[in-house]
Image: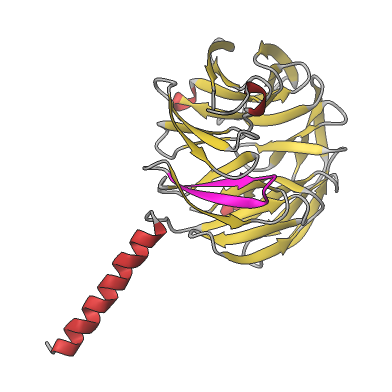
Amino acid sequence: MGSSFVHRALRVLALGIAFGAASGAALAQGTVYVSSEKDHKIYVFDVQGERTGAIDVCKRPRDMRFGAGGQQILVICGDSNAMGVVDLASGKLTDTVPLGDSPEMFALSPDGKTVYVSIEDDNVMAAYDIASKKPLFEVKTGGEPEGVLVTPDGKTAYVTSEVANVVHVIDLGTKKVTKNIKVGKRPRRFMLAAGGAELWVTNELDASVSVVDTKTHTEKQKIRFAVKGMRETDITPVGMVLSPDGKTMWVGLGRANHVAEVDVASKAVKNQVLVGKRAWGMGFAPDGKTLYVSNGLSDDMTLIDAASAKAIRTVPAGRVPHTILVTK
């Protein structure tokens, strides 16, 4: 083997090591999608946070989910009163489903055929058949419904009411509210944890997360947040994401400009990471190493190394970035 070959190999190895050190983390394979409310686009990034494209969608895109087995993005557009359907192969908006006035958040049925949407102006959770675009039914809620979560068995939906400060438990078979769970002030979003035994609920005006027992449908614990130098009223938790291993819940603290890492088993706050302004939306790389955070008031996205709980970099993400999706 010649000395020139060895020297070239060593240079390549050194460059690889330098890149790994500079990145601050081993970032996962995948594509990152960020909805931008004021640009009416979904921005596309690689896992290092470099923007690679943009998709024009309907007006004020917010909540997003993957549909059609990961071949589509379904996106709620609040000012279009519609759900946009984006074909990922072409990178284009290919269809829309009409919804009620001021749709907020949504969930999909396990088979991906039905969408359940919180309709803020009508104070209902509305169900629609995606293929036919036909409304199926509505369930009356308290004022300003927001978060929607459907259980993996497709039998139950949970919906937050920001005004009533409750979580509605809806039987999707009877299409009726079976219980109202009292939580904190202005509940917003959900995540299931502990193998589905717990429902975590962010309380935006209570600086807290309520942990609900999904068997008894009662609040069993409240996790409170404090950020040094911040008033309690500045700590406004909204978005959450569970790590792929199920051990850690990350909570966006809104106007406190931090995200909190919470141990699911002990409910202890392990770390807080400074990000951009009004941290809400979050998404994990499939390997759980990198967390992506949308900062709605600084118009950017922060990448966090989850193992060290440190920010890697912050990149522009359009005007008022909202929801983040990451492909596996």
Q: Is residue 212 left or right of residue 128?
A: left
Q: Which residue sits at x=40%, y=22%?
A: 265
Write down the region rendered in magenta. 291-305
In the rendered image, which quarter is residue 145 located in?
top right
In the rendered image, which quarter is residue 151 located in?
top right
Q: Which residue sits at x=69%, y=18%?
A: 185
Q: Is residue 51 left or right of residue 131?
A: left
Viewer-proximal residue among 1 and 214: 1
Viewer-proximal residue among 108 and 220: 220
Q: Which residue sits at x=42%, y=43%?
A: 306
- Is residue 313 inside the magenta stretch? no
Where's the N terminus, which quadrant? bottom left
Give the image location of residue 251, x and y in percent: 54, 32
Give the image location of residue 96, x and y in percent: 80, 53
Give the image location of residue 127, x and y in percent: 76, 34
Is residue 153 something that shows in the picture? no
Residue found at the very far front of the displayed protein: 229
Q: Is residue 90 left or right of residue 19?
A: right
Q: Which residue sits at x=61%, y=42%?
A: 281
Viewer-proximal residue among 322 and 225: 225
In the rendered image, which quarter is residue 122 located in?
top right
Is residue 242 something that shows in the picture? yes
